[in-house]
Amino acid sequence: MEVAAAAACGANLRFSSPWIWSDKVEGRSNGFPRISQQCTRRHSTELQRRRSEWVRRGGRVSLTVSNACKGSPQQAPSVQSGNICTSFDSKWLLKNKGEEVTSDLNGRCIFLVGMMGCGKTTVGKVLSEALGYSFVDSDKYVEEAVGGSPVAQIIKQFGESSFRDYESEALMNLSLMSRQVVATGGGAVTLPINWKYMKEGISVYLDVPLDALACRIAAVGTDSRPLLTFESEDAYTKAFMSLFTLLKKRRCSYSNADVTVSLQNIAANLGLEDLLDITPTAIALEVLIQIENFLQRNNGMSIRI
Ligand SMILES: Nc1ncnc2c1ncn2[C@@H]1O[C@H](COP(=O)(O)OP(=O)(O)OP(=O)(O)O)[C@@H](O)[C@H]1O
Ligand SMILES: O=C(O)C1=C[C@@H](O)[C@@H](O)[C@H](O)C1
């Protein structure tokens, strides 16, 4: 099936194998993607199979051995991005890195930003545990503030602009706190005032390829996501095309984050072909490594904009 509306969007798409096989999404002469029906069905089934496997394994991943890491856990060297060792349990590495980074952070909050489905909640919970921080989901914070209605209903009932006002108020309140990992809403980055709040802490962009996002969202359904407005019977196509348009508008805003953590880079560094093999623990570890680098580059200070 061809997705005509793709032609309306002028952004560059980055496809990461193996989420979209080259025989299923083909570049067209006009530079826009063509997505086959078969592709979308295969994606959902494959995703569900892999997710069950991932859950059965307890979210574990085997990491590539690096020559840079030798010795016992007691003599563990500091972990550099891209040099994650198999010899130690990744949770052990995360805990240790968490302890190191916690003291550098001096109580500052971490704000996770990124498109819906990029893993802010999943990774945020793991990260907060490693840092000894609390975890807050700003969507949940808004829901509680307005009496328990789901975000989808708030948007439908009051409109996106009112939701953004509630979201800004939530971020303002959260920016006054310390020792919190905050999973922000996917669109929080679009309002400049929110950056003022988030710059009270360290902001981290979780950069996940569009096709992986669409797969994850399609696997759980699009019903609770009113901003996915592309019309299609197929959940993957609906998610992919809507996210494509949203990301085109937001990419620049995400780049304001202090730190970017790219799943494609993690996969490349770990020698993994499949993004689904990257566990939340491995992603949280990369977040901490990148935060540590950022703090070192800026002498422990977050740059304010
Ligand atoms: N590393 C991962 N590997 C595989 N699936 C993942 C991973 N991280 C998250 N997921 C799955 O992706 C989906 C979205 O994750 P999550 O809710 O953490 O994203 P989010 O960024 O908080 O989304 P939103 O902004 O919509 O709240 C969930 O179904 C989750 O189980
Ligand atoms: O990307 C977005 O704009 C959104 C993401 C969700 O987290 C919610 O904040 C809401 O559905 C809007």
Image (tube, rainbow, N blue to C red):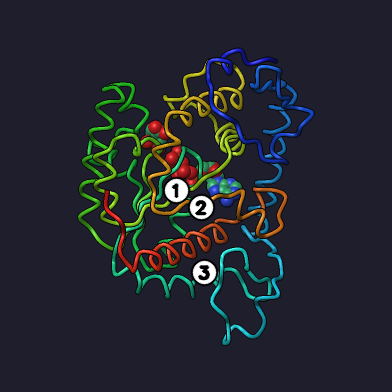
Location of residue 85 (image quadrant): bottom right
> Looking at the picture, how far across and down is residue 140, in whole percent?
33, 43
> Looking at the picture, how far across and down is residue 247, in whole percent?
48, 31
Residue depicted at x 69% and y 71% = 66
**N-terminal label among 1 and 2:** 1
Residue depicted at x 59% and y 25% = 235
Q: Amino acid at mark 1?
A: Tyr
Q: Amino acid at mark 3?
A: Leu
- Within 10 Å of disc 2 (Cα), the crowding (few <14, some 14-19, many 20+) is many
Location of residue 301 (image quadrant): bottom left
Q: Amino acid at mark 2?
A: Val
Q: Is residue 246 above or below residue 95?
A: above
Mark on residue 205? 1
- Within 10 Å of disc 1 (Cα), the crowding (few <14, some 14-19, many 20+) is many
Q: Is mark 1 within 8 Å of ligand 1?
A: no
Q: Is residue 189 above or below residue 74?
A: above
Q: Is residue 134 left or right of residue 25?
A: left
Secondary structure at badge 1 equals: strand
Residue labelled with disc 3: 94
196 or 61, which lies in front?
A: 196
**N-terminal label among 1 and 3:** 3
> Looking at the picture, how far across and down is residue 264, in whole percent?
62, 48
Residue labelled with disc 2: 261
Secondary structure at badge 3 equals: helix
**N-terminal label among 2 and 3:** 3
Q: Is mark 2 within 8 Å of ligand 1?
A: no
Q: Is residue 271 above or below residue 241?
A: below
Residue depicted at x 66% and y 76% = 68
Image quarter of the N terminus: top right
Label 1 close to label 2 by CB (< 8 Å): yes
Residue depicted at x 71% and y 20% = 37
What whole-number distance in Å separates the C-alpha atoms at marks 1 and 2? 6 Å
